[in-house]
Image: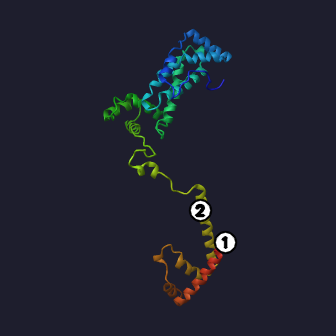
Amino acid sequence: MSETMVLPIPALNLAGSLEQYIQTVSRFPLLSSEEETELGRRLRDHNDLNAAQQLILSHLRLVVSIARQYSGYGLAQADLIQEGNIGLMKAVRRFDPERGVRLVSFAMHWIKAEIHEYVLKNWRLVKIATTKAQRKLFFGLRSLKPGFGSLSAQETAQVAQQLGVRPEDVSEMEMRLGGQDISLEPQEDGEDQHYAPISYLADDALEPIEQISQREQEKLSTDGLNNALSSLDERSRRIITARWLQGDDQHSATLHDLADEFGVSAERIRQIEQRALAKLKSSLSEHI
């Protein structure tokens, strides 16, 4: 049998009537302890999907009741119920009728676990709680807050003590829960069309392939230049480096500076420079 059983349970979707669904599931009869045990044995021993269906249908109202406890997170009630139904099916799959524990008690854990995961996954774009302690704080803070306003220092300390966390953890989670979602796209009737996040969050960096190509081209150019410079004699290399490769025009050597350094005329330095540049151009064209 699969992890979650696909059974004909009442349809629930956002286009339908949630109240009609709730009325429908409330009509399914509750099972006695003896009936529940018998159905559990039929499912366990004979893979009786009809027994599984009866166990599920009789507990759908439990899912509705638990899902209502999570209505404060801004998520559709129908979606919460659907996730809870998945948890219920997992519970039925694992139910052991010989342990003397009613399915309602066993299923609550699985129903809440599925709804918890759904809330954490869908409540805002950024994950609010990533560790077990943060999850406990995430769900506990809403139930322990006395009102909709910010917690006072005393209230923060009381919540922290009840949940077994630090006061600063409570303050941080309260701040994160209180943050407002911002639409990336501008509103149709908004005046600040050019100030929506989508307008300034675009990444202007090159695509990865283009970055690799650019680095390869730069490497080729650098290697080619080094090879071309190595083909020059020492004086020519010194003149080209001093005149063109300083990286700052204000610190480049003049013809007269190099004429004084080598004890020749500025015209002679210019001639050497011209010949060296022509040789460099030829070497670079061959390398690239």
Residue 261 versus residue 68 in the image, above or below = below
Label 2 sits on what residue type?
Gln
Residue 249 left/right relative to 2: left
Which quadrant of the figure contains the C terminus?
A: bottom right
What separation in Å lies between label 2 and label 1 (alpha carbons)? Answer: 17 Å
Q: How far from the left and from the top, in percent, is residue 179?
A: 40, 40
The residue at the point 41 percent across, 49 percent down is 193
The local crowd at label 1, few if under 14, some if 14 to 19, many if 20 or more residues have their Cα within 10 Å, is few
Label 1 sits on what residue type?
His
Which quadrant of the figure contains the N terminus?
A: top right
Q: How far from the left and from the top, in percent, is residue 263?
A: 53, 89
Count of residue discs: 2
Residue 4 left/right relative to 137: right
Q: Nearer the viewer, residue 222 or 13?
A: 13
The local crowd at label 2, few if under 14, some if 14 to 19, many if 20 or more residues have their Cα within 10 Å, is few
**Dot 1: element:** helix
Q: How far from the left and from the top, in percent, is residue 86?
A: 56, 26
The residue at the point 61 percent across, 72 percent down is 226
Q: Nearer the viewer, residue 26 or 119?
A: 26
**Dot 2: element:** helix
Dots 2, 1 in contact, CB < 8 A: no
Q: Residue 169 sits in which quadrant?
A: top left
- Looking at the rendered structure, which numbered label has been put on residue 214? 2
Residue 159 left/right relative to 54: left
Q: How far from the left and from the top, in percent, is residue 95?
A: 59, 19
- Looking at the rendered structure, which numbered label has been put on residue 287? 1
Q: Nearer the viewer, residue 28 or 92?
A: 28
Name the N-terminal-most of marks 2 and 1. Answer: 2
